[in-house]
Amino acid sequence: MVEAGRIRSLADSGNVITATIARRGGGELVGEHALVINCTGPLGRIDRTRDALLRGLLDAGDVAPDPLRLSLATDARSRAGRGIWALGPMAKAQFWEMVAVPDIRHQVKAVADDIAGEWVNERES
């Protein structure tokens, strides 16, 4: 079952999770579930990822989690490592609400400009 709404509370009693959900459009739902899935972007803890590419970058030290482990650590230009940029929710520790298309569009342009600038500088060297 898929429900749209906001979680008001979760209680774990071992084999089941009791969720109280304020439904979108009104009303409340209380139910027992075997599984609850967080759909708010990258994991609550980026360092627990099972994504092969991200896991490999983290394990190799090419990128690092931010201090709160919400996303990748980035600088003000979205750089997560040498030749690596993080966009959208992967940079939410630096930029927080980076989930809306207009925000991501501006971030993508800034990153593209940064990459182009590096490419030009490398060719001139």
Image (tube, rainbow, N blue to C red):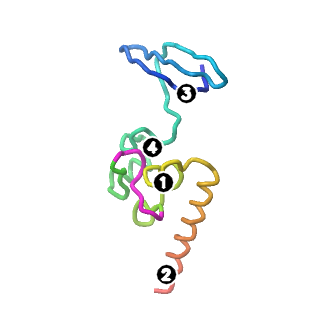
Whether 69 is among the magenta residues is yes
Q: CA distance from mark 3 to mark 1?
A: 23 Å
Q: CA distance from mark 2 to mark 4?
A: 33 Å
> Type of residue at label 3?
Arg
Tag 2, which secondary structure? helix
Residue 45 x, y percent position in the rendering:
39, 40
Tag 4, which secondary structure? loop
- Residue contact at pointers 1 and 4, CB within 8 angstroms: no
Rendered residue at 42%/62% (across/down): 75
Main secondary structure along the magenta-highlighted residues: loop
Q: Give the mark nearest the N terminus, 3 or 4.
A: 3
> Type of residue at label 2?
Asn
- Where residue 10 sits, quadrant-wise, is top left
Whether 50 is among the magenta residues is no
Q: Give the mark nearest the N terminus, 1 or 4.
A: 4
Q: Give the mark nearest the N terminus, 3 or 1.
A: 3
Q: Which residue is mark 3?
A: 6
Q: CA distance from mark 1 to mark 2?
A: 27 Å
What's the mark number on residue 78?
none
- Residue contact at pointers 2 and 4, CB within 8 angstroms: no
Q: CA distance from mark 1 to mark 4?
A: 22 Å
Residue 79 x, y percent position in the rendering:
44, 62
Span highlighted in magenta in the image: 68-77
Q: Which residue is mark 2?
A: 121
Q: Which residue is mark 4?
A: 51
